[in-house]
Image (spheres, rainbow, N blue to C red):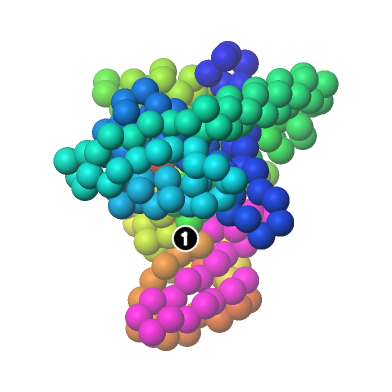
Amino acid sequence: MTADEDLNVAVSLKRGLAPRIGLERVALIEAVDELGSISAAAKRLGLSYKGAWDIVQGLNNLFATPLIHAAPGGRAGGAAEVTERGRAVARAFRRVQSEIDAALARLEAGLAGEAARDLFWSLGMQTSARNALRGEVSRLTDGAVNSEVALRLADGVEIIAVVTRRSVADLGLAVGRPAIALVKSSFVLLAKGEGLVTSARNQIPGEVVSREDGPVSCEVTLAIGGGKTLTATITHESAEAMKIAPGDRMTALIKAPHVILATE
């Protein structure tokens, strides 16, 4: 595992009912200390001026003495100065972060096996895609520009992705390598029956385990084997027309270019 792939943890400190102190607030203290301006610090960190000013006020309210002395200057910027207490708070937070990172590195080094590797990566991964399916690359077929990647999700269950050859190289994809298939639920089409003739590269049979209705759309989840599920978002009208109900056998249709791959 390279330095860029090392496991890390995001520290957030809290006592009682007090607000949390996290990396965003500490980064703002450090940026104000360097730039001498809340507006400049907000711009660097991608915060709104109001958001940054609210953080400053919250920090100053939280501690016995102010962490940042500032005169509101609007978006044009006013002078701001981090106090010695503010610098001490930032240093202490970074020390805590460093100590926890070191402890986590020791913990990771002491845990062996695929189960530990799965735990840290799978729990740490965040994505907006409704479907995130872990599998193992079972086949790679190169083309002139794109490659077809088959990911084995479970015994007898595969999902095919078409990605660029550059992506294959950048992700380090190879047969036997674990990867995650990301699929937006709106990209999953549903059909009743199996062995359909369709242009969709992926035809994954499953059993409906749940249907959640909304005023416009429905979320339908299929069990596809190996303890894995696949969720589709379809219109309520379509769900009613197909009379979809738990226990129904259906086929999920997914175009291969709609499957995004991710690796550690």
Q: Name the dominant secondary structure of the magenta segment.
A: strand
Span of residues in magenta = 209-230
Residue 118 falls left or right of residue 63: right
Secondary structure beneath disc 1?
A: strand
Residue visible at 38% across and 31% down? 81
Question: Which part of the image, by quadrant, shows the N terminus?
Answer: top right
In this image, 156 relative to 203: left or right? right
- Picture coordinates of residue 50, whole percent (x, y): 31, 52
Residue 155 shows up from this direction:
yes
Q: Is residue 91 magenta?
A: no
Q: Quadrant of residue 161?
A: top left
Q: Is residue 7 visible?
A: no
Q: Is residue 150 left or right of residue 156?
A: left
Q: Position of residue 263 (x, y in %)?
A: 52, 30
Residue identifier under label 1: 252
Q: Is residue 192 above or below residue 63?
A: below
Q: Which residue is at the front of the view, 66 or 98?
A: 66
The percent coordinates of residue 141 (x first, y second) are 42, 25
User: At x 62% / y 37%, what residue is drawn?
Assistant: 11
Q: Which class describes the residues within 10 Å of circle 1: few (<14), some (14-19), or many (20+)?
A: many
Q: What kind of residue is marked 1?
A: Ala
Identify which residue, 114 or 32, lies in the foreground: 32
